[in-house]
Image (tube, grey):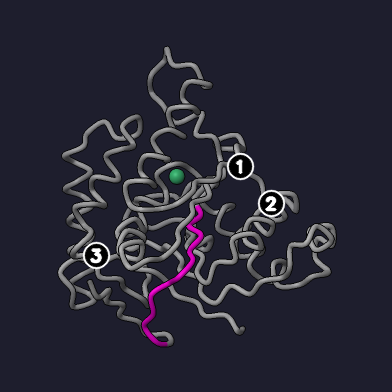
């Protein structure tokens, strides 16, 4: 399977090692699981980072937060496995209370220096709201995006940032590509025509977050089709691609 990337920036490429970062279980799968699945089929090594514990987003008045946390982790692990990812890391911060701290950035730096990805996928922190789509972007999404960008540049690159990590043997690393999930702006499209069905199945593993599976499937298919039309593909996912100097 040849993966098509249509990009206004740099040359098309297939990532080798990817860290996909989300604030909550399911964030990555909504925005990027078609591309991740396509890259995994092509041999890419993919790992997930989920920053919060998902302990708040339920309308079930009887549910205990501890049970919700366990369910969210189980669902995210199943989703990642289904698309071919190797590992899911959970930072366990309280849902709705993710803060932009040096401690958070340091934990991301540590993970990036261990995994050494060429590509990091994360939500664009500049997406605060969309009047076109009628939504406010969740505060945790924006914090996750900002902390990840800060970790990629400059902290992961510089050995003098968090010197105790360097002393542990975690050498500096330069991430070559950032692919930012932004619902309105795109300069890079990945063809997911062959992985759309898998993406829909991946989303459906998040049972506790998706009350109406048919509605979500229809919404995702329509979105992938519309992005595909923009890119000249049947179905696509769109990103803002940013190439960093190596
Ligand atoms: Zn979310």
Residue 47, compared with residue 204, is above or below; it is: below
Say which residue appears at 80% left-offset and 63% top-offset: 166
Where does residue 26 sit, x and y in percent of width and height? 39, 44
Label 3, label 2: how far apart the Cα atoms are: 31 Å
For the N terminus, the quadrant is: bottom left
Label 2, label 1: how far apart the Cα atoms are: 8 Å
Q: Earlier in the sequence, mark 2 or mark 1?
A: 1
For the C terminus, the quadrant is: bottom right
Give the labeled residue for mark 3: 192
Q: Earlier in the sequence, mark 3 or mark 2?
A: 2
Q: Find out whether the residues at labels 2 and 1 contact each other: C-beta distance under 8 Å.
A: yes
Residue 103, compared with residue 14, is above or below; it is: above
Q: Nearer the viewer, residue 41 or 20?
A: 41
Say which residue appears at 42% left-offset and 85% top-offset: 9
Ligand 1 found in image quarter: top left
Whether the residue under disc 3 has CB within 8 Å of ligand 1: no
Where does residue 98 sit, x and y in percent of width and height? 61, 43
Say which residue appears at 51% left-offset and 54% top-offset: 21
For label 3, the SS is loop
Q: Nearer the viewer, residue 9 or 34?
A: 34
Are there few (<14), some (14-19), or many (20+) residues within 10 Å of tag 1?
Answer: some
Label 3, label 1: how far apart the Cα atoms are: 29 Å
Identify the magenta region: 11-21
Q: Is residue 12 magenta?
A: yes
Where does residue 205 sit, x and y in percent of width and height? 30, 38
Q: Earlier in the sequence, mark 3 or mark 1?
A: 1
Q: Find out whether the residues at labels 3 and 1 contact each other: C-beta distance under 8 Å.
A: no
Give the labeled residue for mark 2: 107
Give the labeled residue for mark 1: 91
């Amino acid at each position: 399977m040849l993966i098509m990337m249509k990009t206004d920036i740099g040359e098309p490429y297939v990532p080798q090692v990817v860290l996909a970062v989300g604030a909550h279980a399911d964030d990555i799968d909504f925005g990027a699981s078609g591309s991740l699945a396509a890259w995994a089929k092509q041999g890419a090594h993919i790992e997930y980072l989920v920053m919060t514990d998902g302990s708040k987003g339920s309308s079930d008045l009887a549910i205990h937060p501890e049970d919700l946390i366990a369910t969210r982790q189980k669902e995210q692990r199943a989703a990642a496995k289904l698309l071919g990812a190797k590992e899911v890391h959970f930072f366990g911060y309280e849902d709705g209370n993710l803060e932009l701290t040096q401690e958070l950035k340091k934990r991301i730096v540590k993970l990036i220096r261990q995994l050494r990805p060429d590509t990091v996928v994360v939500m664009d922190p500049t997406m605060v709201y969309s009047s076109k789509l009628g939504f406010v972007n969740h505060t945790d999404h924006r914090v996750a995006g900002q902390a990840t960008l800060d970790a990629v540049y400059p902290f992961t690159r510089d050995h003098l940032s968090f010197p105790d990590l360097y002393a542990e043997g975690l050498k500096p690393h330069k991430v070559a590509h950032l692919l930012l999930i932004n619902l309105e702006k795109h300069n890079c499209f990945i063809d997911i025509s062959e992985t759309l069905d898998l993406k829909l199945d991946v989303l459906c593993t998040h049972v506790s977050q998706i009350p109406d599976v048919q509605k979500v499937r229809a919404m995702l298919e329509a979105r992938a089709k519309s992005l595909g039309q923009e890119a000249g593909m049947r179905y696509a996912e769109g990103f803002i691609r940013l190439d960093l100097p190596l």
